[in-house]
Amino acid sequence: MNDSTNLNEKYIVLTNTNNEYNNIIFKDGTNVQNITDDTPHDQYNLYYINQNDLGEFIKDRPEQDFTYCWAVTLLNKSLDSVDDYMHYTDIYKLSNRIPIQDMDIWIDENACLNIIKHCPHLLRYVKTQTFNVCMTAVRIDGTTLQHIRHEQDAYCIEALKQTTDAQKYIQSLTPAMLEIINNKNEDNSASQRLHELNDRRLSEGLSDKPINKKDEDPPNDTDDSNQHTQTPITVNQRGLSKYLTHQNILGASLIALTGAIIGVIWYRSKK
């Protein structure tokens, strides 16, 4: 390889405040790892990525705290092993360490869109926050609204549709926004009630099939076919035993009551 990177494929390395990644310390200048044919692939330490894969790289490592970006220069006869978007080598030069937020990529809308789709909270670094970039972010994660520097109703509405948690980042709630919040809260309450009902039915053995929201809705009074029909109850073995026991008790009670009424009528007819 040449002692320079392709401008269309700008390679970078990300590290924390101590210039580390995976407990490996990187330095300005030449970095070397002695790799042989017997070196396991998971012990390759000199990684690098295409800057366009920045979002996917950070998303896949939520436990890492990245602070700096380094420019990578690949050297002649460098080993180049590729695993998905990760590249590994045995030697390269690192230079131009800068904070991640100072990278040139944050003024490129297309590059930012690609990054945001993988890791929407990186919107906080985007310098040119276009309508398209902001809408993409809030539709994936409504709480990214906190990173938008110029609030617009359109962003707020889309953010609330994704999660009502976004309301804490809205300066002024409009009636349309309040309606979205109320509707989502009602839907969440209905879903919670349905979940609790299914748990109770299953725990009591009343049904092996959970109820869905459509099953829970009342029948339409204008539909004659629903007025005299009843959905059959599905029971499992334990539920069937309870069901039959209740039916037997009810039947015995009705017989006893009928006998008592007949006895009273007979007694009075003899007077």
Image (cartoon, rainbow, N blue to C red):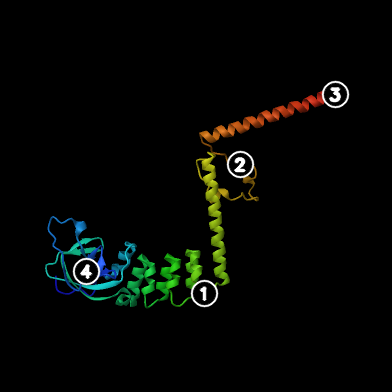
- Separation (CA) of disc 3 from disc 1: 84 Å
Q: Secondary structure at mark 2?
A: loop
Give the quadrant of residue 172: bottom right
Residue at x 43% of width, y 69% of height: 144
N-terminal of the pair, mark 3 or mark 2, is 2
265 lies left or right of 164: right
- Separation (CA) of disc 4 from disc 3: 109 Å
Residue holding disc 2: 230
Contact flag, marks 3 and 2 (Cβ < 8 Å): no
Give the quadrant of residue 141: bottom left
Q: Secondary structure at mark 1?
A: loop
Camera-nearest residue between 71 and 234: 71
The percent coordinates of residue 95 (x first, y second) are: 21, 75
Q: Which mark is residue 269?
A: 3
Residue at x 50% of width, y 72% of height: 170
The percent coordinates of residue 178 (x first, y second) are: 56, 68
Quarter of the image where the N terminus is located = bottom left
Residue holding disc 1: 171
| Between marks 4 and 1 in the image, the one whose residue lies nearer the viewer | 4
